[in-house]
Image (tube, rainbow, N blue to C red):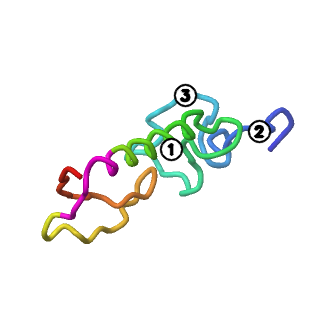
Amino acid sequence: MGPGRKGRGVRHRPDLYTDPETFDPDRWGPQRPQPPRNAFIPFATGARKCIGDTFAMAEATLALATITARWRLKHLPGHHQTRPVPGASIGPGELRMQPTPR
């Protein structure tokens, strides 16, 4: 990084993006050449890390605790195997379950 660019994210690197300082949401469109896989890290780290990540984790934990305190969750027949699904984060894909009151 050159002078005055300390703390700027990878999305500002001219070696990865044409005209990186211009707002261009179409730069990730299918008609454009795709940058390397590690050239975009949304909400991930650094000075511009998502300010809601801690809240989201706390909210998800409280929601799961509330649900499981009141309901027993059982996999539906034929839906007990899950596989990781790549995306913005890795998740289990569909979890089809039957809730029954505790």
Mark linked to residue 23: 3
Q: Secondary structure at mark 2?
A: loop
Residue type at numbered disc 2 = Gly
What is the number of callouts on the image?
3
Range of residues picked out in magenta: 67-75
Q: Secondary structure at mark 1?
A: helix
- Tell me where residue 13 appears, x and y as whole percent: 68, 43
Q: Is 86 placed left or right of 43 in the picture?
A: left
For the residues marked 1 and 2, what is the alpha-carbon distance in whole angstroms? 25 Å
Q: Please report the residue visible at 43 percent of the width from the left and 58 percent of the height from the top.
A: 90
Residue type at numbered disc 3 = Phe
- Tell me where residue 73 appears, x and y as whole percent: 25, 57
For the residues marked 3 and 1, what is the alpha-carbon distance in whole angstroms? 30 Å
The residue singled out by tag 1 in the image is 57
Q: First in sequence: mark 3 or mark 2? A: 2
Mark 3, mark 1: which one is toward the viewer?
A: 1
Q: Is 62 placed left or right of 79 in the picture?
A: right
Q: Secondary structure at mark 3?
A: loop
Query: Is 74 part of what is drawn in magenta?
Result: yes
Residue 10 or 80: which is nearer the viewer?
80
The residue singled out by tag 2 in the image is 7
- Tell me where residue 78 appears, x and y as whole percent: 14, 71
